[in-house]
Image (spheres, rainbow, N blue to C red):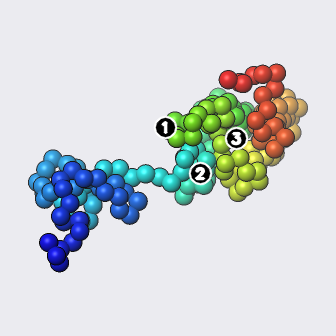
Amino acid sequence: MGGGNADSASPIGRAQMGRGCCFLETAGVEGSAAPQAGRASEAGRMNVGVAHSEVNPNTRVMNSRGIWLAYVILVGLLHVVLLSIPFFSIPVVWTLTNVIHNLAMYVFLHTVKGTPFETPDQGKARLLTHWEQMDYGLQFTSSRKFLSISPIVLYLLASFYTKYDAAHFLINTASLLSVLLPKLPQFHGVRLFGINKY
């Protein structure tokens, strides 16, 4: 017992923490039915779970690698799908792209509240929209700037390709304001007329 590793003398079934992961000793059971993908590099240990360091993962999801590119690709894909519908003219397609994008942004960022994750924050995020949870409520972060500039760019493109037609311009402007105004710091946590308060 003197010169051996301290971990090798531990009892079977003892959970240990190591390198940010929780390991459960399997006492040399190599041919078990446990999935091989979750195996740790040490022999006889199985990865039971990996904990993230965020109390609420909603706060950092828009800072994930590749999320901005995926967002742009999805908007482009929506536009291409609408372009493939034969009876839609180019101005109608641009206006639909803008309105559908802004509607989805409004619903997912400014209407839906809470998190899809079980968070240990005592329900603090339950009454906050995704926009209010982002970056722990800090204003003017890179994610917030990106999500504020993207509808403006789409609005300018839609206005240009609709040749500033009055009807399209009115629809596109109303759609833009519906997603820009809730993003202002002055509206952080504000529920106009008590709508979406609970």
Is 4 situated left or right of 131 in this image?
left
Q: Which amino acid does label 2 sit on?
A: Arg
Above/below status of 16 relative to 87: below
Under mark 3, the amino acid is: Glu
Residue position marked by numbered label 3 in the rendering: 132
Amino acid type assigned to the residue bearing label 1 in the image = Glu
* Label 3: element kind: helix
Is 92 on the left-hand or right-hand side of 181?
left
In this view, the residue in front, 155 or 192, is 192
> Which residue corresponds to mark 2?
60
Q: Mark 1 points at which residue?
A: 118
**Tally of numbered tags:** 3
- Please state, as top left, top right, bottom left or bottom right, where the N terminus lies in the image: bottom left
Rendering quarter of residue 168: top right
Disc 3 versus disc 1: distance between alpha carbons? 18 Å
The label nearer to you, 3 versus 1, is 1
Q: Which residue is drawn at 75% across and 22% down?
A: 195
**Disc on the earlier residue, 3 or 1:** 1
Q: How far apart are marks 1 and 2 (CA)?
A: 15 Å
Q: Position of residue 56 (x, y in %)?
A: 56, 45
Q: Distance between the residues labelled 2 and 3?
A: 12 Å
Question: Is 93 above or below relative to 57?
Answer: above
* Residue 42 visible in rendering: yes
Between discs 2 and 3, the one toward the N terminus: 2
Q: Which residue lies furthest to the right in this view?
A: 166
Camera-side residue of 144 and 121: 121
The quarter in which the C terminus is drawn is top right
Mark 1 is surrounded, within 10 Å at the Cα level, by few (under 14), some (14 to 19) or many (20 or more) other residues, namely few
